[in-house]
Image: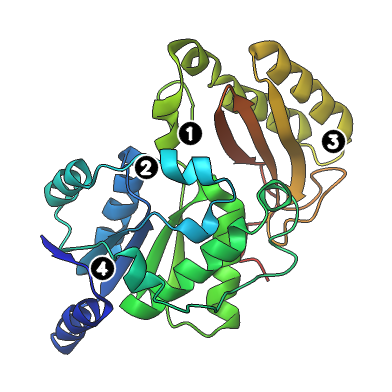
Amino acid sequence: METIRRVAELRARVSDWRAAGLTVGLVPTMGALHAGHLQLVRRAFEDCDRVVVSIFVNPLQFDRPGDLASYPRDEATDREKLVTAGVQVLYGPLVEEMYPEHFSTGVMVAALSEGLCGAHRPGHFGGVATVVSKLLLQCLPDRAYFGEKDFQQLRIIERVTRDLDIPATIVPVETVREPDGLAMSSRNRLLTDQQRRAAPKLFAVLTEMAAQLADGTTAAEPVLEAGRKSLSAAGFERIEYLELRDSNLLRPLERADRPSRLFAAAWLGAVRLIDNLPIIDRQPEGRGD
């Protein structure tokens, strides 16, 4: 596996693949790779001849400096996992390569960035949209792969590629979970033993609520309020949001009478966990239009 740090080198490698008639998949990550990331890689290999995995801890998307400083970094271990997975290129740009001196351009997505995580992490999705736009333009893959755990992010990235005519297909990949249901995340390693035992309650509450709302007629708010109480009783100190929203445009809903999802963000100690779960839909989810 080749490690590339510079945009020009990445473009040259992808150009060589293109000349050979090969298709290219991109898996953008911030490192601290786990089984969820590796599932994205496996999915990419199902569709593409060559796979690039980027590792870049993006400073623009951290609204709390302490969060950026504490974000886990272990490129050597990540590299071993990617070599085992058969990845051809690890793209690990330096900060000064991604954001050179006097960098002053950003990408913002209205509406989809509001509410949910956008309401609690000012500037976060602007940072995400900017770095993903750059990664897509630097690599110009046929397809790029993103997990549904960060569903709001997924919808935003879909909108960016459509609105800016970036010639890449965004491929969603279902959330990968631990055996007890906890969505895999690099932040899970920061949980204490006691917090780790409590963490699966987030998925359990979402699952119970989804079953209650699946008929499409049940009012959401009483179910949501019961869910908040259950999470508090399980040890979640702060619940940022627990909401029912339209799956496509992420608008709040009073009942699951269209393709919809439950979204949650809650804290265990200093660790913020997010998750989401689809309500059984009467029609398939589409892109966020």
Label 1 element class: loop
| Depth order, front residue of 198/63 | 63
Q: Is residue 80 visible?
A: yes
* Numbered tag placed on residue 220 in the rendering: 3
* Numbered tag placed on residue 183 in the rendering: 1
Q: Earlier in the sequence, mark 2 or mark 1?
A: 2
User: Disc 2 designates what residue?
Assistant: 36
- Say which amino acid is labelled 4: Cys
Q: Nearer the viewer, mark 1 or mark 4?
A: 1
Please name the residue shown 77% across and 52% down the image: 258
Please name the residue shown 54% across and 49% down the image: 150
Q: Earlier in the sequence, mark 3 or mark 4?
A: 4
Q: Is residue 176 visible?
A: no
Where is residue 65? Give x, y as percent. Answer: 53, 46
Judged left or right of residue 54, residue 224 is right
What is the CA distance from the residue labelled 3 to the residue labelled 1?
23 Å
What is the CA distance from the residue labelled 3 to the residue labelled 2?
30 Å
Chosen colour scheme: rainbow
* Quadrant placement of the C terminus: bottom right
* Numbered tag placed on residue 48 in the rendering: 4
| Depth order, front residue of 278/66 | 66
Q: Earlier in the sequence, mark 1 or mark 4?
A: 4
- Say which amino acid is labelled 3: Ala
* Numbered tag placed on residue 288 in the rendering: none
Where is residue 2? Give x, y as percent. Answer: 11, 64
What is the CA distance from the residue labelled 4 to the residue labelled 2?
18 Å
Judged left or right of residue 155, residue 116 is right
The answer to whether marks 2 and 1 mark residues whose Cβ atoms lie closer than 8 Å is yes
Within the image, what quadrant is residue 6 found in?
Answer: bottom left
Where is residue 181? Give x, y as percent. Answer: 49, 26
In this view, 175 is above or below 1: above
Please name the residue shown 61% across and 39% down the image: 277
